[in-house]
Image: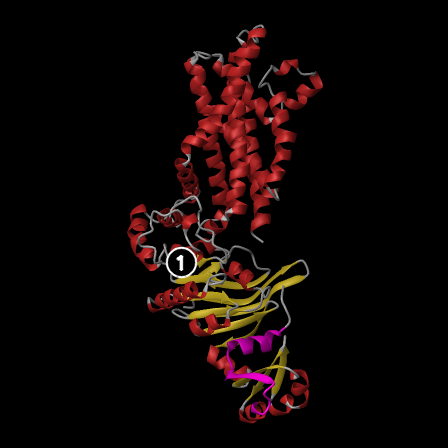
Amino acid sequence: MAVLRVRGLRKSYGTRCVVDGVDLDIRPGECFGLLGPNGAGKTTTLKLCLGLIAPDSGSIELMGFDVPRQAREARHAVGVVPQFDNLDPDFTVTENLLVYGRYFGLPEATIRARIPALLEFAGLGARGDTPIQTLSGGMKRRLTLARALINDPQLVIMDEPTTGLDPQARHVIWERLRQLRTQGKTILLTTHFMEEAERLCNRLVIMDHGRIIAEGSPRALIERYTEPHVVEVHGEGVDAWAKDVGARHCERIERSGESFYCYTRDARPLIAELEARPALAYLHRQANLEDVFLKLTGRELRD
Amino acid sequence: MRPGLRFIPVWRRNFLVWRKLALPSMLGNLADPMIYMLGLGYGLGAFLPEIAGVPYIAFLAAGTVCFSTANSATFESLYSAFSRMHVQKTWDAILNAPLTLEDVVLGELVWAASKSFLSGLAIMLVVWVLGLSTSPLSLVALVVIPVIGLAFAALGLAVTAVSPSYDFFMYYFTLFITPMAMLCGVFYPMDALPEVVRWFSQVLPLAHATQLIRPLLFGEWPAHALWHVLALLAYAAAGFWIALRLFRRRLLK
């Protein structure tokens, strides 16, 4: 049984089509990424899947339940980490977990029995009685994740789990998500951090303008959509160099800000050429998911 | 959870917050109406003849029970509910659990009515202690107060559903709640109003409240009691239905 199965999902606001024919299949135990620039329709897709808004057309099956008709039943087996922390500021750490458990109709004893392990998981073992206001951003995020586990869900849905966190806090969240996967949980996350998707997701889709434009494992997507080598070049006279010389030595060249990105299957001729030009600085690296993402969704700003 | 009882965890959430702040919250809720009631009742009352056969303070006490209940339900369903919905996003968190907007709004409605019951009850205790009402019938007021609370909580939630910010609530107080205090027999009998105004003010929810509570405190069974109770319940039902539709439009799209 698929954890989540979506077919032909559509949602428009007025004349603007936010979700435009999305299909998804999420299998048990995988970490599935929903990638896309701001406004691509990621959050709306999640809300549709949770039954919080009604689709114009299409079908959604979440944990075997028909959504939105049986959304309530489906949400019993799902944990949600929203994009912005909405912990209860009037409560302590423990009270937040307790009160949230009640929303699932769980017996008081069951909730209380689960809390110590969840605090441990969130790295807040000694802070059960701490008021929320005194927690750091990373602690709040971990508590929000722990709160999403109070009902022992099979699927955890996370909307941009590490946005706004510092690198240390981000690595802790990633480590916890890997821990969840080893426990057999299925994870669905949205992100626009390519590094995050590449590290965590075994499968992902890239969304833009409400449509899925690519699908596969991070490795497969990189192989399929971009050349394996990237040489980033910047410095005095780079414009002229790119036009006259750079373009001849690579399959594809793109400009972003003051740098040129040269994509190629064989970087050796390009590097030999650049070695003879001390005015230009370059960086040679392997192609990554960000290169795929930028190729597919473009480099212009999204607001 | 049984379908009709799903609002209870929402109610309990609000109760847990209230329990932490119970003392200042009670004082704030009670001090204000009490000062008005005692100050105007004894101070202004000293210059007044009896109204409807009782001292002015006894007349005003019945009005204060109603107005205090209405005010408390209104405050909770405007400012506090708005904080939870819009500022803290508490409702969003709840809606990700297996609860629906109906459960949340019903929880808020019953909670605001519960809190207003405490305000009404506190004034009633003062009324009894000061001997302003000695009739056993005044105990029936304790059944009526929650109905008043439900009506005003439901109307308040409907306003919250369309409010862009806290400032908006001032309109509701200035245009609806405060005029009602003057038109519905809180401070003086409605008979004192011009006939045209009286026809209008008679259908306002606070008028139904005072026409139930005042006779009960004076030891009489209210005239048209059933009609007044049904009218308040109708306000509660209509307010809740409209609030729910407006919240749905605002939050679930």
Above or below: residue B21 compared with residue A231: above
Is-magenta flag for residue A279? yes
Residue at 38% from the left image edge and 62% from the top image edge: A154
Q: Which residue is mark 1?
A: A142
A163 and A71: which is toward the camera: A163
Mark 1 neighbour density, 10 Å: few (under 14) some (14–19) many (20 or more):
many
Residue A180 percent coordinates (x, y): 36, 65
Q: How is the image coloured?
A: secondary structure
Left or right: A116 as drawn, with respect to B105: left
**Residue at (54% x, 72% y) in the render:** A206
Image mark 1: chain: A
Residue A52, percent across and down?
Answer: 52, 55
Which stretch is magenta?
A275-299
Count of all numbered marks drawn on residues in the image: 1
Res A223 visible: yes
Q: Is residue A26 visible?
A: no
Confirm whether the magenta stretch covers residue A80.
no
Horizontal and vertical percent position of residue A70: 47, 55
Q: Amino acid at mark 1?
A: Arg
